[in-house]
Each structure stands twice: as structure tokens, then as C-alpha cells.
């Protein structure tokens, strides 16, 4: 859910905050990755999480 919230706050995601890796969530991740010049995988990898400011 945190990834969806971060993507939504940055204007990349407009779907429900439900923690599911839906096609909309994956497309939003890809769009974010493109702008950040990361590999466009649609997955929540460490580099993408770091760019979103999410650390565990």
C-alpha cells in the first residue's frame, strides 16, 4: 500500500490503495521508473523503492 500511496502523491497512480499489484499499479511503477531512468520492469525493486523514498 505504501508504494501505491507514494505513486499517488506524485501523480502516477489513481487507483485504489489496496496493496494489490494490479495492472494499474504495475503501469504506474513503469511510468515512474521511466521518468527516474530506471529499468522499466513494473516491479518494486530496491532502486525503485529508494527513488520513492521507501526504506525498510
Image (cartoon, rainbow, N blue to C red):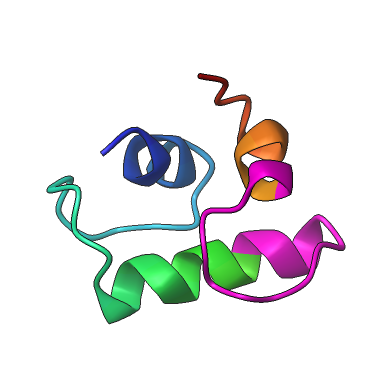
- In the displayed structure, 9 sits above or below 17; it is above
Left/right placement of residue 17 relative to residue 25 reads: left
Residue 39: % across, % down: 78, 71
Query: 8 left or right of 51?
Result: left
The picture quadrant where one finds residue 50 is top right
Vertical placement of 44 versus 47: above or below? below
| Drawn side of residue 42 relative to residue 3, left or right | right
Residue drawn at point x = 52 percent, y = 54 percent: 44
Q: Position of residue 40 (x, y in %)?
A: 70, 75
Q: Quadrant of the N terminus?
A: top left
Q: Residue lying farthest right? A: 37
Which residue is at 59% across, 72% downward?
30
**How far across and how far down the image is residue 16, in percent?**
14, 54
The quarter holding residue 52 reads top right
Which residue is depicted at the point 31% across and 80% down?
Answer: 23
Of residues 32 and 56, the one nearer the viewer is: 56
Which secondary structure dominates the residues rendered in magenta? loop
Identify the residue shown where x is 72% and y is 37%. Answer: 51
Q: Position of residue 22 (x, y in %)?
A: 24, 72
* Numbered marks: total: 0
What segment carries the magenta color?
A: 32-47
Magenta includes 48? Answer: no
Amino acid at each position: 500500500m505504501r508504494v501505491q500511496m507514494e505513486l499517488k502523491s506524485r501523480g502516477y497512480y489513481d487507483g485504489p490503495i489496496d496493496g494489490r499489484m494490479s495492472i494499474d499499479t504495475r503501469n504506474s511503477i513503469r511510468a515512474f521508473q521511466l521518468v527516474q531512468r530506471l529499468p522499466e520492469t513494473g516491479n518494486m525493486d530496491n532502486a525503485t523503492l529508494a527513488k520513492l523514498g521507501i526504506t525498510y
